[in-house]
Structures are given as structure tokens and as C-alpha cells.
Image: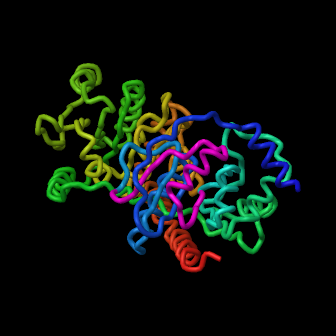
Amino acid sequence: MAYSLGLTLYNLANRGGAEAEAPRPPRPSGRLVWLHAPSGDSLPQMIALARRLQDQTSVAVLLTSPVLPVSLPRHLTGQPPPDDNPTEARRFLDHWSPDIAVIGEGELRPALLHEAQERGIPLTLVEGRNPHWLRGREGWWPGLMRSLLAGFRAVLTIDESGARAFRRAGASPGTVRASGHLEYPSSALPCTEAERTELARILATRPVWFAAALPESEEAHVIAAHRAALKLAHRLLLIIAPEDPTRIPALAERLEKIEGWTVARRGEDQEPDDEVQVYIADSAVEFGLWYRLAPITFVGGTLSPGGARRDPMEPAALGSAIIHGPRAGRHGAVIGRLAAAQATSLIGSAADMAEALGELLAPDRSARLAQAAWTVVSDGEAASAEAVRMITTLLESPE
């Protein structure tokens, strides 16, 4: 009774208008797994799970998310989720007719999930953190969360704290398991091996650090840190990849005329020989090269509005110790995982950068951070394998 009342109140409060049905691509033939990523925090992991499912099974995969990227891997269908009301839920499920629903994080869309349960579609949850209503749909819906969660066949959470939260909220204790984070997609950017070998020969034993996707607002901070660090390691080389490549001429002039440093530019086929103190890169295509050559990377944008301009998993995957500021931006979940593993050097302000850089110039210190970061990068294989087993088992025996 409480469930019916809660669902009725929810649907009355969130009635949708009579909108024209949005165009949808054709449903793929065969069995279809529906994955839902409520936010950017779980989107990369859900994309990686989709790839694993397609590699290991013959199923088609639909991925819904309000934050879908511009491009998705081949054979993966992406769609925004429907508005959560009975009419849109029926339209969505009529068209896609998924064989199983796999919800990320813990977001609950009552109209959609209820309609799926009514149709006998197995509901599962992965990367579980805590159960919560769809944003903007919070309210008092008596008995609704408990009844919805009781209908889930399996709930895989990132840790025991998440598992307790789902059990308390109404999930059947026997369905809840703390399996850990799902694996993150491979972030190891490629490079031309011949280029890496030649530049490594030129650099020999020089200490190197890299400022990745550096915005103009942080140029002065990096310059000040390099100036201070040169007093500790006079052969130190700074590689800068400006966020805006049109800044290169002005930046090079500043470094040469004001700082008195010797500067070389990748775009002019110059090399970072022994006299060069700053090497300016001009292409984001070669980030995989710079991460491999630099044992230390500052993630540009983390001291500025907008946050990190690049995914911190990129340097982590290639063994470069990470320095970053407090502004994570859209990469907050990733930086949070790395920071929780003590795999980064967090600076509270620009003034801290020189100190952090000086500490990481000690090879043992940077190696510890790089190793901890690699553990995070490689973590998740077991949890993803368990998720695939759970999905395939329910596909074979959905009752």
C-alpha cells in the first residue's frame, strides 16, 4: 500500500506534458543490455563495462546518460535518458525492450524502474555509492525507495559503506555485495616509439617535469615553481604544453626575455639539448610522449576556474607522478580516487607548487606516487569481471 501511494504521489508531482516522441535509432537485433550512467563520475567505467561485455559476449549495449560524450566506441548506442514519467518510460521501454537494466551509482528513477519491473526486466546496480532520487525529483514518497530497491536482483557497491547504505534503504541483503570500483578505461595514450627513444637519449639523466594543458592563468605559477626548482636541480627541464597553442610565441618571448632562460620549440623542430631549460610543445597529440618522458606532471587547470583540462588518469597510466590543485572540474571523481590512494601531490595554492615539485624531484618520492597511481589505474578488473558474470547469468536465467 505504501509503495502504491508513494509511486502515485511521485507520478502526480512529476507529470510530463504531451511532448512529441524524440527520434531514436533502431534497436539492435538480439539481446540488449541497457547501461545507465547518471553522471560523469561513472560514465567512463560504464563505457569500459560496455566494451568488456561486447568483447566477451554477443549482446548489444545501450548506454544512457545525461552527459554522453561527443563520440562513443563503435557498436555502442548512446541516448539521453527519458524524462521520468510513466508516458516517457513506456515509450522508452517499448522501443528498446532491454533484456536487463544495469544502473550506475544508485540513482533511482521511479517511473522508469517501476515500468521495467512490471515488464519483468531484471534490474541490477553497479558502481553503487548510495541510493538517491533523480536530481530535482527529491521528495517524500512513502515506501517508494524501499520497494524499488527490493526489486533489484543484484547490487554491487564500491565499498562496504555503500553496501550498508543500500541494505538500510531497502535492498535485499542477499543481493548486495561490495565488489569495488569498476575498471577505468585504458588511459595510456600512444606515442611514436622512435621519437621517445631519441628524446630519451637527448635528455639522458636530466630531471624533467611537464605542465599539461597549461592555461594562461597558471603560466606565472609554473614559471615561479621552475625558477625555484632550478636552484635545487640546475639541469631541470620544464616541458610546457599550453592549453591555447596560439600562446606559444608570447610565452616563449616571456621566458627568454624576462626569465633569461633558453627555450626550444617543438613546432620549429628544435631539440631539448643540455642548454635548454624550457621546451614548449605545440600539439596535444603528443601528450603520451611527454607523460613517458616526464616523471612529474602538473595537471593544468587545477588552480583555475573550470578545473583540470586533462584526465589525470593519463599521466597515472604512464608512470608520471601527479601534482594538482584543488579545482578538479569534470575530473573530480578521478582525482578523488587518486587522492584517496595517496597517489597525487595536492597543492592548496600556486605558492605550494615549488615545494611540491622540489619534493618530487627526489626519485624515490615520485616513484611512490607513480606506483600508487598505477595501482588505481589497474584496479577494478575483478569488480568488472564480477559485473559481467552477474549480467550474463541473469541474461541466461532472468527469473
Q: Percent x, y for residue 203?
A: 21, 50
Left or right relative to 133: residue 245: left
Whether residue 25 can be seen here: yes
Q: Percent x, y for residue 217?
A: 41, 24
Left or right relative to 325: residue 189: left
Q: Quadrant of the N terminus?
A: bottom right
Residue nearest the observer in this picture, 71 or 40? 71
Left or right relative to 58: residue 111: right
- Spot the residue most to the left: 269
Q: Residue at x 47, y 54 (%)?
A: 44
Whether residue 364 can be seen here: no
Identify the image quadrant of residue 341: bottom right
223 inside magenta stretch: no
Residue nearest the observer in this picture, 189 or 200? 189
Residue nearest the observer in this picture, 204 or 231? 204
Q: Is residue 328 above or below residue 51?
A: above
Q: Is residue 227 above or below residue 1?
A: above
Left or right relative to 237: residue 178: right
Q: Residue at x 34, y 44 (%)?
A: 209
Q: Is residue 317 above or below residue 232?
A: below
State the extent of the magenta-drawn residues as a range: 74-103
Q: Percent x, y for residue 91?
A: 56, 49
81 inside magenta stretch: yes
Q: Quadrant of the C terminus?
A: bottom right
Residue nearest the observer in this picture, 50 or 195? 50
